[in-house]
């Protein structure tokens, strides 16, 4: 015990000389007592808001302890978020000691404010009674206080942890009794929450109109109604799943130059990052009214309620035609989805045409030739034929007008446009439902696996492509997926080759390619959070562990030499911890170890605190750093150290007459270096008989063996 106290006194002197011990004159007292055998941070929880979490705002936390047993020493390591908070000062709660150890002479290390962790800081402190003194239990009291200052305003909902439980009994946070036995206790962390402004109602957006039919040259003004969320809003209009350049206000006018069918929706983002997407609006665009055309009316039939056995009609219409004598067209459809059940030819301008019709429902084909007795003239769309269909199955099919011929009274061809129709009663919808990088960070050049989950939200098997991007536009890879069945999900793994990717934070986006007639385009894209690409390598390793002895008697001091190396390319500060089996030997903090440098630390293992008759495996480890490059080299295991019962000279697990005899035979013998440096040992030298470890076999050794006569490893 005196040796430990002396070592601590030397260590505290070094720390004082380096000006890294903070002494406070402000006492603190426990306000939140816990049940016995606990160490805790108080207050346990605090809700901050915009008014009391501005940059520069300061607050205090206290660490307290309630232990039922005698206490000789304690150590605390408290982790905190260094990106948001700065520990400005720290001290004991009853200077020059903690309140808990008031009335006892102590030696202390710290409190040290350690900022070596990326994203996290640490408060390190240990305090020990001097000599054979100890704090009798039970006792409840405070240990240290720490003043924190906001260096950045937290985001709404952000939590600020104060963690003392990370290395309980294995490093930072420990408590030992007057025999230096590690005590069992519960460590209670604290978590403070930034509540931010009152949570706004959910963001939602509606656009109007939801459907429109226009001609090329006309336009549709779209307006939006946004509710909820946090103002101000940002807007982005989408056309057929693609963002429209410059369409970033709450309204937008769609002015198409090509006829066809279009899907439009609006994405809104509020001031705190919440997003909402409107329902799809559908716009059908026909050629200008003045253009001669033959078309299917309506151009689209999208009705999910039209299941098998439903029926519907479509008309074939003419518009803006003069002197039409003959009209001929082919009309095809998917016969597995529809079957023809009727056709009707209409009278136009008081006359029926001579009609020739060929119907082949097995091929999904209709051919019609209409010859009017007198040439007709029509301006507004006029129906010439009606087709009646029966729905056979779910799906979608183009109602295809082709090989159309319009002839005037002199049999000259009339230039015209043909507009097809569409029937769809099937939901086609593929979605990306999750994007999960294997790690939130990677080193430049590492292949980072990214898992992308896709789902078929429709009611038909789909084949489509899945692509992944970083920072929205940089392609990582494309994987095709064949025949994903309805309502099924699948996860695809992409390997992101980060070679040449600059250091920084990147968002990951998964995209499912659109399928024809897709029902919902808003779920084809999924954006994950942040992946950090690093070029600065953080890698520390334990490269060697050696012991001064391979055997000892209980109570001997064993020197454990641990070598740690910085294999990275940036200066690091970290902890080195040594263990005998699971028993803590010691912890030492290494500050600012340069790249490619190594340091050897010596731990003095006092074996009086452990059980004899056992071979102890010696291990050492270094702190796992945030974003550590290689975790496999942080732990190093040496061989073992045998701990014997005091006086068991022959190592048979008991102290017997033979042990006394062996020591008596070696009485007076001395060990190596006894006479002069480099001198050989006495011929009768037996190191196992040197019980008091003074390099000579004397009467004290024999007396100790005799006192322990009869002791054994067996009960």
Image (spheres, rainbow, N blue to C red):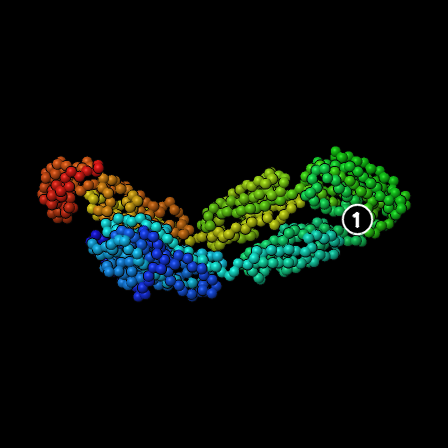
Q: Is residue 573 visible?
A: no
Question: What secondary structure is marked by label 1?
Answer: strand
Which residue does the image show at 30% across and 53% down from the upper left? 67
Is residue 691 something one can see in this rendering?
Answer: yes
Q: Quadrant of the C terminus?
A: top left
| Nearer the observer, 676 or 118 | 118
Residue beneath the point at 59% across and 48% down = 523
User: In the image, residue 111 lies at what x, y percent?
Assistant: 32, 59
Apparent side of residue 32 relative to residue 359 in the rendered image (left or right): left
Query: Residue 176's spot in the image, x, y percent?
Result: 27, 51
At x 65%, y 51%, the residue is: 280
> Would you place residue 504 above or below residue 314 in this image?
below
Q: Is 580 placed left or right of 653 in the picture?
A: right
Residue 287 placement, left or right of 58: right
> Residue at the spot x=53%, y=42% of the render?
491
Q: What x and y, as percent, mark residue 267?
A: 61, 55
Looking at this view, name the residue that lies furthest to the top: 362
State whether residue 494 is above or below residue 120. above
**Which one is in front, 473 or 174?**
174
Residue at mark 1: 293
């Amino acid at each position: 015990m005196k040796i430990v106290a002396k070592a601590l006194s030397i260590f505290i002197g070094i720390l004082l000389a380096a000006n890294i011990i903070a002494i406070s004159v402000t006492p603190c007292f426990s306000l939140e007592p816990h049940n016995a055998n606990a160490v805790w941070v108080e207050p346990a929880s605090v809700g901050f808001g915009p008014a009391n979490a501005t940059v520069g705002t300061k607050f205090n936390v206290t660490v307290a302890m309630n232990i039922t047993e005698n206490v000789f020493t304690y150590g605390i390591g408290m982790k905190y978020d260094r990106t948001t908070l700065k520990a400005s000062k720290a001290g004991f709660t009853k200077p020059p000691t903690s309140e808990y150890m008031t009335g006892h002479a102590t030696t202390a290390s710290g409190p040290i404010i350690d900022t070596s962790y990326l994203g996290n800081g640490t408060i390190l402190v240990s305090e020990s009674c001097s000599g054979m003194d100890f704090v009798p239990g039970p006792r409840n009291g405070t240990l240290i206080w720490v003043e924190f200052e906001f260096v950045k305003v937290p985001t709404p909902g952000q939590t600020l942890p104060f963690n003392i439980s990370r290395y309980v009994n294995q490093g930072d946070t420990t408590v030992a009794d007057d025999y230096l036995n590690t005590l069992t206790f519960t460590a209670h962390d604290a978590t403070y929450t930034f509540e931010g402004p009152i949570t706004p109602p959910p963001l939602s957006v509606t656009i109007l109109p939801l459907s429109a039919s226009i001609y090329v040259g006309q336009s549709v003004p779209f307006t939006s109604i946004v509710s909820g969320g946090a103002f101000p809003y940002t807007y982005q209009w989408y056309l057929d799943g693609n963002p429209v350049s410059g369409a970033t206000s709450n309204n937008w006018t769609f002015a198409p130059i090509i006829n066809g069918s279009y899907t439009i929706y609006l994405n809104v983002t509020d001031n705190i990052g919440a997003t909402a997407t409107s329902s799809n609006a559908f716009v059908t665009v026909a050629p200008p009214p003045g253009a001669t055309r033959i078309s299917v009316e309506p151009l689209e039939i999208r009705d999910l309620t039209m299941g098998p056995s439903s029926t519907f009609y479509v008309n074939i219409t003419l518009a803006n035609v003069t002197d039409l004598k003959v009209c001929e067209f082919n009309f095809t459809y998917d016969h597995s989805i529809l079957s023809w059940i009727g056709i009707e030819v209409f009278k136009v301008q008081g006359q029926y045409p001579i009609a020739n019709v060929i119907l082949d429902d097995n091929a999904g084909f209709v051919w019609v030739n209409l010859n009017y007795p007198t040439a007709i003239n029509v301006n507004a769309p006029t129906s010439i034929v009606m087709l009646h269909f029966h729905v056979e199955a779910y799906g979608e099919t183009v109602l295809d007008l082709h090989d159309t011929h319009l002839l005037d009274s002199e049999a000259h061809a009339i230039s015209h446009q043909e507009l097809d129709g569409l029937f769809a009663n099937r939901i086609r919808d593929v979605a990306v439902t999750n994007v999960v990088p294997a790690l939130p960070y990677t080193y430049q050049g590492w292949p980072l696996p990214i898992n992308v989950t896709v789902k078929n939200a429709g009611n038909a098997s789909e084949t489509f492509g899945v692509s992944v991007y970083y920072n929205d536009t940089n392609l990582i890879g494309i994987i095709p997926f064949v025949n994903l069945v309805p309502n099924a999900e699948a996860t695809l793994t992409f390997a992101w080759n980060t070679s040449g990717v600059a250091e920084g934070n990147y968002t990951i986006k998964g995209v499912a390619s659109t399928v024809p007639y897709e029902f919902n385009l808003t779920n084809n894209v999924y954006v994950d959070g942040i992946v950090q690409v690093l070029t600065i390598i953080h890698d520390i390793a334990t490269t060697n562990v050696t012991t001064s002895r391979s055997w000892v008697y209980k109570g001997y001091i064993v020197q454990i030499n641990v070598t740690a190396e910085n294999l990275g390319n940036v200066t690091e500060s970290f902890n080195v911890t040594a263990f005998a089996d699971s028993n803590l030997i010691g912890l030492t903090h290494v500050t600012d170890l340069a790249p490619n440098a190594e340091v050897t630390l010596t731990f003095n293992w006092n074996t009086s605190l452990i059980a004899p008759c056992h071979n102890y495996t010696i291990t050492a480890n270094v702190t796992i750093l945030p974003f550590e490059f290689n975790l496999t080299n942080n732990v190093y295991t040496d061989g073992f150290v045998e701990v014997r019962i005091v006086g068991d000279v022959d190592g048979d697990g008991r102290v017997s007459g033979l042990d006394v005899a062996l020591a008596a035979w070696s009485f007076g013998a001395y060990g190596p270096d006894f006479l002069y440096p480099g001198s050989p040992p006495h011929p009768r030298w037996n190191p196992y008989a040197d019980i008091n470890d003074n390099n000579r076999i004397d009467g004290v050794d024999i007396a100790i063996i005799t006192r322990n006569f009869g002791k054994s490893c067996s009960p």
